[in-house]
Image (cartoon, rainbow, N blue to C red):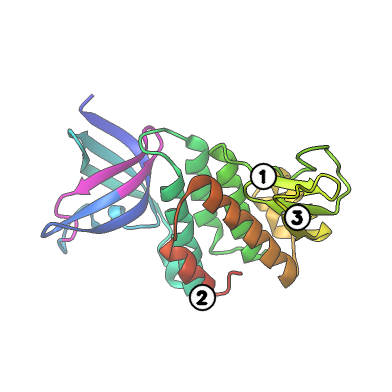
Amino acid sequence: MKYLQTKALVLRSRPFAEMDRLLTLLTWDEGKISAKAPGARRVKSKLAAAVEVFTCGSFLLYRGRTIFTVSQAQVEVSFREQMVHVENYARGQYFAELTERLIPEGEPNPGVFEHLLAAWSSLQEWQGDRELLTRFFELRLLLLLGFQPHCENCLFCGDLQGPFYWSAAAGGLFCERCRPARQPGVSLSRGSHAILRAMQRVSLREMKNLRAPQGQQRELADFIRQFIQYWTETGSLKSLAFMREHGDP
């Protein structure tokens, strides 16, 4: 079919040609796609509001040879107002860029769509720990894309007691007895291990009840980000550096 009617999240929107915008969309039906929005930079463009980052909209897209073209677009939910706060903007941008880097082109994944939508939505009135919200987003995104690190027990013997060490190359945690000579790993505190296990089980709403001291925040951030770098080869993210400037470990 030449036309695709779908719901989409705008992951990226940048100037293109004289008055157009080039979009990276996460669609419900086709996964991640690229699309051109003709004339969207004009002051009176009917597309302008719907093609901004942090927008969930209904899109009618024309399927070209190499790229889609936006024929119609209507805003369903815009999160731009809550992104005025710099910390919300930094996290929201990081969620979008990480999703864009990790999800493959043209493969529908409704779970990832709903996960990002819920994360953006939660930022405005989040009463819990924002650093743990970010760790939850990262960890659940990995799970939805099949990259889940092994956090429950020792990779090799199944020990639940610890103490535990971790290695991105090993894919998760291992105990003192099974600690490989060539991969000595990094020590993980019992508190951080408990939070990792909890994050694998709880919903986004239940995350509001979790708290962690600064030392555990640093451990969790190092563990998850090094895992992401090793297994997904995402490279550096501009939004990650910006987010770290505004309070993330």
Q: Which residue is mark 3?
A: 195
Secondary structure at badge 2 equals helix
Instruction: Name the residue: 41% across, 39% down.
Output: 104
Quarter that holds the N terminus: top left
Quarter that holds the C terminus: bottom right
Q: Which residues are magenta?
A: 24-41
Location of residue 207 with respect to 32 vertically, above or below: below
Q: Amino acid at mark 1?
A: Ala
Instruction: Name the residue: 20% across, 35% down.
Output: 62
Secondary structure at badge 3 equals helix
Is the residue marked by circle 1 packed among few (<14), some (14-19), or many (20+) residues within 10 Å?
some
Q: What is the distance, in whole Å, between disc 1 and disc 2 at their CAs?
A: 30 Å
Residue 27: quarter of image: top left
Q: Which residue is mark 2?
A: 245
Location of residue 1 with respect to 13 vertically, above or below: above
Q: Which residue is mark 1?
A: 170
Q: Residue 121, how many percent across, how many down?
A: 51, 55
Q: Main secondary structure of the magenta part?
A: strand
